Image: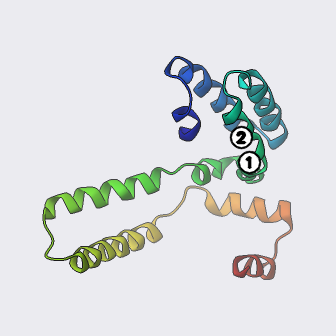
Amino acid sequence: MRNILAKVRVQHRNIIATEIKEVFHAKDKQEAEQLFMKFTQKWKNIYPNLMNNLLTIRENIFTYMELPEGIRSMVYTNNALERLFKELKRRLKTMEMCQSEASAEKYLYLLLRYQNEKFLKRKLKNWEYYFQLYREQHSYTKENIHSEVIL
């Protein structure tokens, strides 16, 4: 969504943001695709390159729609990543100066390792329930899941 809004004129940003949010918050994949096609047809005359690029990656845009509705926001948002970068920036700012590039890399490594351990302890709301629904819909077994992860 940010990429789309960065490539449109300021006067159209609010309208486009509202319309694209409707697409991303649709109940199912079919409804999202219908809204997406309406959106691209409406804006194709004003932003032809942007709409053509979106149409070429259409299949990738709606991959998250196959997941249960409760965990979609956990997948398509990048808030955790933004929070991580903000934390790294805050911690590095207090250091002001490192002795060498190697010492800065080591410090970043330790910070990322700490953040990773902290993130792994976090429990996602209703994750077990939604993951079970997803497994039932796609008839996954432990063997299927492990083979897909390896691939």
Return the x and y of residue 22 as percentages of the image width and height: 68, 29
Q: Where is residue 47 in the image (x, y as percent from the top left)?
A: 66, 27
Q: Which of the pair 56/31 is nearer the observer?
A: 56
In this view of the protein, which residue sits in the foreground, 132 or 50?
A: 50
**Residue 133 picture quarter:** bottom right
Above/below status of 94 relative to 72 = below
Residue drawn 55% across the image and 48% down it: 77
Question: Residue 131, located in which quarter of the rendered image?
Answer: bottom right
In the rendered image, which quarter contains the C terminus?
A: bottom right
Residue position for label 1? 57
Please tell me which residue is depicted at 79% across the width and 82% down the height of the picture. Answer: 143
- Secondary element type, mark 1: loop
Residue at 40% x, 74% y is 117
Amino acid on which the number 1 mark rests in the picture:
Ile
Would you name the residue on which mark 2 appears? 54
Q: Which amino acid does label 2 sit on?
A: Leu
Q: Is mark 2 on a helix, strand or loop?
A: helix
Q: Residue 24 carries which label?
A: none
State the image coordinates of residue 12 (x, y, percent, origin top left).
Answer: 57, 19
Which residue extends farthest front?
A: 49
Residue 126 placement: quadrant: bottom right
Residue 50, visible in the rendered structure: yes
Q: Which residue is drawn at 54% across and 59% down?
A: 124
